[in-house]
Amino acid sequence: MSAPPLSLARAFLFVPADRPERHARALATGAGGVIVDLEDAVAPERKVQAREQLGAAFAALPAEERRRLLVRINAAGTPWHDDDCAQVGALAAQGLIAGIVLPKAERAADLSRLATAAGPSAVLVPLIESAAGLAAVDELAAGPQVLRLAFGNLDFQADLGLACDADEAELVPVRLALLLASRRAGLAAPIDGVTPDWRDAPRLAADTARARRGGFGAKLCIHPDQVAPVHAALGPSAQELAWARRVVAAIREAGGGVVSLDGRMVDAPVVRLAERLLALEHT
């Protein structure tokens, strides 16, 4: 199972599930992934109706666009979770969605049940938002059909009673834990959390730069205006692409193995980095 578009996506844009007129507009922003949200974005009294309308709303979208669609269901233990699982399973079986985001992910068993309900065609994205989720991060990363981990930075702060400044320095070890778990499980680079004030461009730029320095390959967005800056900032620069092409060419010319480029050894991990940069060029 693979989903290259979502593996390489850099910006994931949330859109409310009960606003179907916004779904196509969200896809038109160029976001690598669009997360139709049944959880935080929908009031309790509207959740059932929003869920039931998803099939018709998604069927109206072009099939190619649906390869970028995910649904964030309600968390395990909530009154809506079981019906959400059944509905997204039906949507996945019809080819109407590519994946599912599980909020408050804390138990591997919940992921296994969701994978069974969703069927083999849907990828899963566990959202780490609590101390319990962090404690289980390796089990969650190794779960069935998991494509990437995502960080719910605001809910995580609330769960632990943190009062972080804008730099979120207290969360550095948490982000590193998600990165390490992703690497150990062989997942695509994790997805960083949101910048809550969509009007604060400097804060968005700083947050996205921190994500890139920390090894994150994507970021959650809450407004269409965040998509293009995030996508650009998390993509490879012209200098990085030029370096990556030289690395691949040197390995190809040498017929594989270890070579020297600019006085530095180029081995398998360096080649993987170069190949990833080149894969991002056209996403």
Image (spheres, rainbow, N blue to C red):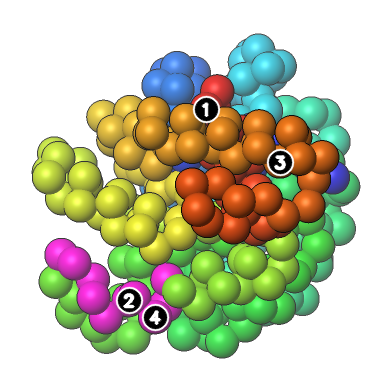
Distance from disc 3 to disc 4, alpha carbons, whole Å, reads 35 Å
State left or right for residue 136 relative to residue 178.
Answer: right
Chief SS of the magenta region: helix
Hey, what amino acid is under mark 2?
Answer: Leu
Distance from disc 4 to disc 1, alpha carbons, whole Å, reads 30 Å
**Which type of secondary structure does the marked residue at label 4 adopt?**
helix
Hey, what amino acid is under mark 1?
Answer: Glu
Q: Which residues are magenta?
A: 166-175
State left or right for residue 38 relative to residue 172.
Answer: right
**Which type of secondary structure does the marked residue at label 2 adopt?**
helix
- For the question of whether residue 196 can be seen, the reply is no
Mark closer to the chain start, 4 or 1: 4
State the image quarter where residue 44 is shown. Answer: bottom left
- Let me know if residue 124 is in the magenta part: no
Say which mark, if any, is on residue 281: 1
Please tell me which residue is depicted at 55% across the width and 46% down the height of the picture: 261
Pointer 3: what residue?
Answer: 251
Pointer 4: what residue?
Answer: 173
